[in-house]
Image (tube, rainbow, N blue to C red):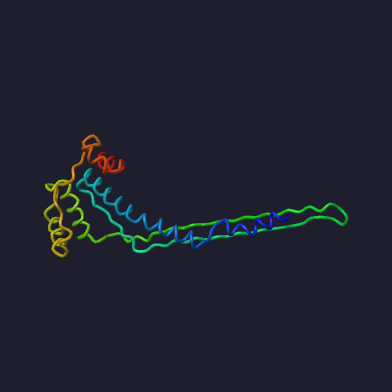
Amino acid sequence: MRPALLLLVALPVLSGCANRQLSFSTLRQTSTLADIQETQVVENFARLAANPGALPFLSLANSGSATVTDGGSGSLSFLGAHRLFTESTFGVSASRSIALNWGLAPLNNPDRLKAMKAAYLSVLDPSLVDPAEQTKLNDVIKADPSYAINPGWMEVGGKWDVPKTRLARWSLRQDVRLGDA
């Protein structure tokens, strides 16, 4: 019985503090934001390389939450009769639930989406850019010159088309996605 009682007392200590887990989960969740944004850009390049008429997509994370819930229970019961052997049972359970969420706000402004399409296509192949969409992109660049683009700096092909010096800098996943487009 003493080992069970000791285990029941030690269980919260062994499972760790909820605030440490919350801190760890929050930092880990925050590090995924750059991955989400990078994946959207790579997917848009692959989509427009395969079909220049496709519309790009973009969602921005505008909120996030991390929740850690700890729970535990213990039970102890005796079953016996007068002057007979007494049976005892005990049970201990613990649980931890972690929920990480991002709230996403999709970009649905048609002018912004057309400007994005023009930006992606001008990087892939400037000859594919629709003049009306180029006008939308020029308006965005006039409002903020930091959005200026050097056209034609990206090429599309298979993994074998990428020079070995670039393969060292790119992950295999990105090469395959762009190469298979």
Q: Is residue 15 left or right of residue 169?
A: right
Residue 41 or 169: which is nearer the viewer? Answer: 169
> What is the tally of numbered marks visible in this picture?
0
The percent position of residue 38, horizontal first and vertical second, equals 29, 51
Q: Which residue is drawn at 13% across and 55% down?
A: 134
The percent position of residue 140, horizontal first and vertical second, equals 16, 61
The percent position of residue 116, horizontal first and vertical second, equals 21, 55
Q: Which residue lies furthest to the bottom in this view?
A: 143
Q: In this view, does 26 lie to the left or right of 60?
A: right
Q: Which residue lies furthest to the top in this view?
A: 160
Q: In this view, does 159 lie above or below 16?
A: above
Q: Residue at x 11, y 47 (%)?
A: 127
Residue 39 or 86: which is nearer the viewer? Answer: 86
Residue 163 or 87: which is nearer the viewer? Answer: 163
The percent position of residue 54, horizontal first and vertical second, equals 23, 49
Instruction: Indicate the quadrant where residue 12 lies.
Output: bottom right
Instruction: Indicate the quadrant where residue 28 lies.
Output: bottom left
Question: What quarter of the picture does the C terminus occupy?
Answer: top left
Question: What quarter of the picture does the N terminus occupy?
Answer: bottom right
Q: Residue at x 72, y 58 (%)?
A: 76
